Structure formats: C-alpha cells, structure tokens
Image (cartoon, grey):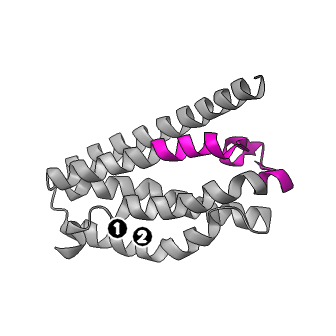
Amino acid sequence: MLIWSSYWLLPLLFMFHDFEELTLVPSWLEKHSPNIHGRMLFGGIKRADILALGIWEEFCIYLLLSATAAWFNYPLLIVAATIPYLAHLMLHLVFSIVKRGYVPGVATALLELLPTIAYLTALIKLTHSPAWQWVLIILIVAVLFVVNLGWIHWEMAVMGQRLAHK
C-alpha cells in the first residue's frame, strides 16, 4: 500500500526529467540538428520560455490524473498515465542511439527507467479493475496523450513564430 500512497511519484519523476529537457534543449538545438527521419525533436523549439509552457501543461495533466486517481483510490488511472511516460523515456534512449550521442532528457531517462518500471509493476499488482476498464482507461488516456502531444507541439510552434515576428 505504500507505493499507492505515493501517487505523487509520477509527477515528481516527470518534473525531474523535464527539468533536464528544459535547461538543455535550447543550447543543444543550437549545436545539433533536431531532425530524425524528417521529424523535429522537441518540436524544434529553441526558446526555453515556450518549451517551459509545454512542459508545464503536460505536468499539469499528470498532476491532475494523479490527484484524481488518489481521490477516487483508482490506481488504474496512474497505470494508464505511467505507460505513455515510460514510452517517452524509452524514446529518449532511441533518439540518443539514432543521434549517436547525448540528447537532452536521456540522462534522466536512464536514471528513471528502472524505477518507473518498478513503480508501474507495483501499481499493476494493486489494480483489481475488470478487463474492460483496463482497455477503456488505457485507451482513453493514450488517446488523450497522443492528441495533447500533437496539439501542444503545434501550439508551441505557433507561439515561436508569433514571438519571432515581434
């Protein structure tokens, strides 16, 4: 039960990881190409203030999901939110391999990968929801994160363009 009482762990890990991104992405992008197979890493955002807004928005979503899960004693919600976060960490490792070097976020991804897997495993053991809820909640949260990721990167690009013209 101790692991479940620490529902705040996921937003804390998220904040720790994203602090690395926030502080290092702008200078990294000045020295490296952000392209991988035609896709821009970090949305190509070079301004820390715009990147911070995107990170803050995603952090708020994780915090809201964690608080809701704790309030309703529903660990499946945290399980569903941890899966995209785990995928995010793994993508940093993939990006680092493809780029053959450091990519902002890879250091904390390496540090957080095993604890996140352990946390997810412990939460799964505490989750006694029926199979239909597993499918429904994980699907809803996955769609939420994919749609939000696309939207926030688009919004950050628009902000960057607007501020560049001022």
Residue with the mark numbered 1: 120
Q: Is residue 45 magenta?
A: yes
Q: In which quadrant of the rendered view does residue 102 lie?
A: bottom right
Name the side, left or right, on which 54 lies relative to 158.
Answer: left
User: CA separation, marks 1 and 2?
Assistant: 6 Å
Q: Which residue is mark 2?
A: 116
Numbered range of the magenta stretch:
29-57
Q: Do the CB atoms of the residues marked 1 and 2 lie less than 8 Å apart?
A: yes
Above/below status of 166 relative to 43: above
| The C terminus sits in image quarter | top right
Compared across the picture, whether 102 is left or right of 116 comes to right
* Label 2 element class: helix
Label placed on residue 8:
none
Q: Residue at x 27, y 62 (%)?
A: 7
The amino acid sitting under disc 1 is Leu
Label 1: element kind: helix
Q: Nearer the viewer, residue 106 or 121?
A: 106
Quarter of the figure with the N terminus: bottom left
Left or right of residue 123, residue 19 in this image? right
**Image height check: is 6 above or below 91?**
below
Q: Residue at x 39, y 58 (%)?
A: 11
Residue 113, given in percent of the width and then of the height, sits at: 49, 72
Q: Residue at x 34, y 50 (%)?
A: 63
| Closest to the observer, 84 or 61 | 61
Q: Label 1: how many residues lie within 10 Å, few (<14), some (14-19) or many (20+)?
A: many
Residue lying furthest front in this view? 166
Picture coordinates of residue 151, whole percent (x, y): 54, 32
